[in-house]
């Protein structure tokens, strides 16, 4: 070895210790096959370095991206060649690779080239607008070639690299990528990314080593990858394989992908599909499909589009319709609080989805008329009986009636939903100067809006319901509600 080459191995041109990938380069170029063709591999390495230089952060270090890529190669190759006996063993090995600054001795330059070519192809397709933007949303678009990225993104990126490296049809790449991208939205996946990165690699290799090319065939691995291949996937892929009457795969994919990319759906459209196909659950459909069901009965693409349109309208106007949630399972009620349920997102709540279906069936009404007609129907349920309204015991229904009165008749509700959507509940008799307060209801409950914290002994009139502390005692508020409902 010449003196200059020895110097290169230990120091770079700036007199600094070499970056990890340069140390890796020195080792890789010691391989006999590489030494026989050093000019070719030297140019390849320069191309790789140049790629990450062009895609680094402004004023950043290109080595971060290159080192990250080499780590991806190590991860892919490790789980390509070995299936661990337990999840714990696999996760342990994965963490070891992540911590290690050097790639495995078994990895050679041709292997790196294969995966680099695949990565570059993904980048070229991304720049050409091939992928739907949802795959690269969050921080992925800004970081994926520049530095260490959120681990969950590897669940979609590494399978894509594997897919291209096997020279599968590029026309189906977007479908393949979308499947893994949607999988990252599952709660279990987000809580245990290491496990699912490993599983995604295993699944990608199983699929790519087979003769399968169409993503619908990935359901053949359902028994092994139950957390990845969901009943929703089976449902959609069955439709793609055997479209219902008057539909075709391209139209189905276009509609489903549009819905999947809507922020409130975030890759999951199970409830919309159920609503458009008249089945109780995907589990029931899967059971039926195993005994010979080849197509989904009654699925209507037109109905799906209409339901999705209503879903978008209601989620996009949540402030305008939020009052409708008060008398629903979106809120829970205790002796001293009415709170929005936090264990399920409101737009996934069954009562909200019922509202979506109702809106779809009454799409000829304006949104304002739709909500007001619902409110009028609720009040009419008391049959014009003031006594029944006064003796209403449900705190949620009381607040709903206050909401209708203030928003439709008194015009005193504007802006209430901006930041506070929960209610503290007081007993009128417990409040200081209780004679200054008013309740429409016999049980004397008083309500105050709050966000996250509320104290029983601290009523704040700024967030209390207006007529409770600013009442016109000559007005018959309940009769006004009854009259308004019958207009």
Image (tube, helix red, strand yellow):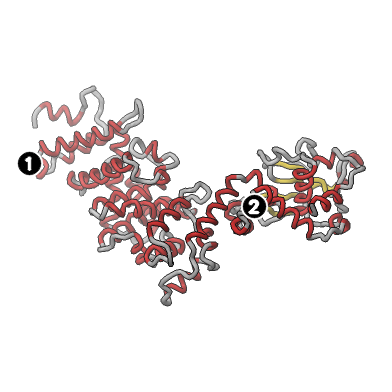
The answer to whether 40 is drawn above or below residue 387 in the figure is above
**Percent from the top left, x then y, of residue 81?**
25, 56
Q: Tell me: residue 319, above or below residue 237.
A: above
Dot 2 surroundings within 10 Å: few (below 14), some, or many (20 or more)?
few
Q: What residue occupies the far bottom of the structure in this picture?
A: 291
Question: In terms of sequence position, does the residue under pointer 1 or pointer 2 come before the other?
Answer: 1
Within 10 angstroms of label 1, few (less than 14), some, or many (20 or more) residues?
Answer: few
Q: Image quadrant for the N terminus?
A: top left
18 sits left or right of 227 in the view? left
- Residue located beneath label 2 in the image: 365
> Which one is in front, 79 or 329?
329
Q: Residue at x 18, y 39 (%)?
A: 27
Q: Callout 1: helix, strand or loop?
A: loop
Query: Which of the numbered marks, if any, corresponds to residue 36?
Result: 1
Mark on residue 170? Answer: none
Looking at the rendered structure, the secondary structure element under dot 2 is loop
In this orientation, does residue 374 appear? yes
- Residue nearest the viewer, comparing 77 with 358: 358
- Residue 270 in sight from this viewpoint: no
Give 421 or 416, whichever is nearer the viewer.
Answer: 416
Find residue 392 and report its horizontal and vertical position in percent.
82, 57
Q: Quadrant of residue 208?
A: bottom left
The front one of 115 and 411 is 411
Q: Nearer the viewer, mark 1 or mark 2?
A: 2
List the single residue furthest toward the left: 36
Residue 412 located left or right of residue 24: right
């Amino acid at each position: 070895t010449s003196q200059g080459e020895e110097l290169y191995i230990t120091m770079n041109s700036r007199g600094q210790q070499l970056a990890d990938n340069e140390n890796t380069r020195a080792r890789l170029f010691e391989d006999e096959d590489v030494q026989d063709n050093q000019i070719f591999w030297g140019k390849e390495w320069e191309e790789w370095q140049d790629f990450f230089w062009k895609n680094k952060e402004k004023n950043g270090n290109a080595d971060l991206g290159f080192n990250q890529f080499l780590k991806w190669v190590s991860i892919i190759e490790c789980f390509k060649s070995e299936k661990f006996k337990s999840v714990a063993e696999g996760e342990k090995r994965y963490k070891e690779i992540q911590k290690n600054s050097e790639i495995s001795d078994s990895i050679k330059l041709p292997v790196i080239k294969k995966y680099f070519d695949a990565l570059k192809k993904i980048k070229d397709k991304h720049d050409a607008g091939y992928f739907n933007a949802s795959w690269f949303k969050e921080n992925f678009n800004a970081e994926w070639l520049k530095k260490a990225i959120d681990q969950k993104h590897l669940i979609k990126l590494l399978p894509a690299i594997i897919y291209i490296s096997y020279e599968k049809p590029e026309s189906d790449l977007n479908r393949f990528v979308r499947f893994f991208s949607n999988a990252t939205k599952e709660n279990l996946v987000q809580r245990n990314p290491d496990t699912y990165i490993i599983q995604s690699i295993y699944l990608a290799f199983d699929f790519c080593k087979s003769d399968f090319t169409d993503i619908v065939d990935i359901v053949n691995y359902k028994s092994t990858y139950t957390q990845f291949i969901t009943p929703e996937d089976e449902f959609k892929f069955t439709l793609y394989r055997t479209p219902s009457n008057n539909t075709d795969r391209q139209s189905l994919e276009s509609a489903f992908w549009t819905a999947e990319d809507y922020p409130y759906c975030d890759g999951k459209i199970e409830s919309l599909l159920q609503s458009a196909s008249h089945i109780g659950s995907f589990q029931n459909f899967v059971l039926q499909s195993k005994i010979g069901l080849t197509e989904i009965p009654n699925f209507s693409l037109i109905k799906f589009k209409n339901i999705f349109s209503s879903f978008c309208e209601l989620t996009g106007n949540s402030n305008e319709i939020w009052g409708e949630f008060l008398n629903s399972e979106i809120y829970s009620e205790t002796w001293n609080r009415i709170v929005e349920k936090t264990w399920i997102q409101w737009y996934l709540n069954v009562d909200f989805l019922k509202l979506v279906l109702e809106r779809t069936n009454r799409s000829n009404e304006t949104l304002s008329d739709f909500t007001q007609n619902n409110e009028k129907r609720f009040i009419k349920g008391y049959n014009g009986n003031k006594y029944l309204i006064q003796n209403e015991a449900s705190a949620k229904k009381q607040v709903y009636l206050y909401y209708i009165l203030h928003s439709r008749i008194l015009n005193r509700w504007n802006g209430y939903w901006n930041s506070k959507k929960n209610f503290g509940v007081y007993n009128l008799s417990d409040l200081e100067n209780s004679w200054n307060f008013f309740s429409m209801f016999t049980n004397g409950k008083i309500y105050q809006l709050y966000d996250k914290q509320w104290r029983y002994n601290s009523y704040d009139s700024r967030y209390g319901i207006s007529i409770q502390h600013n009442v016109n005692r000559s007005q018959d508020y309940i009769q006004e509600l009854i009259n308004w409902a019958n207009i």
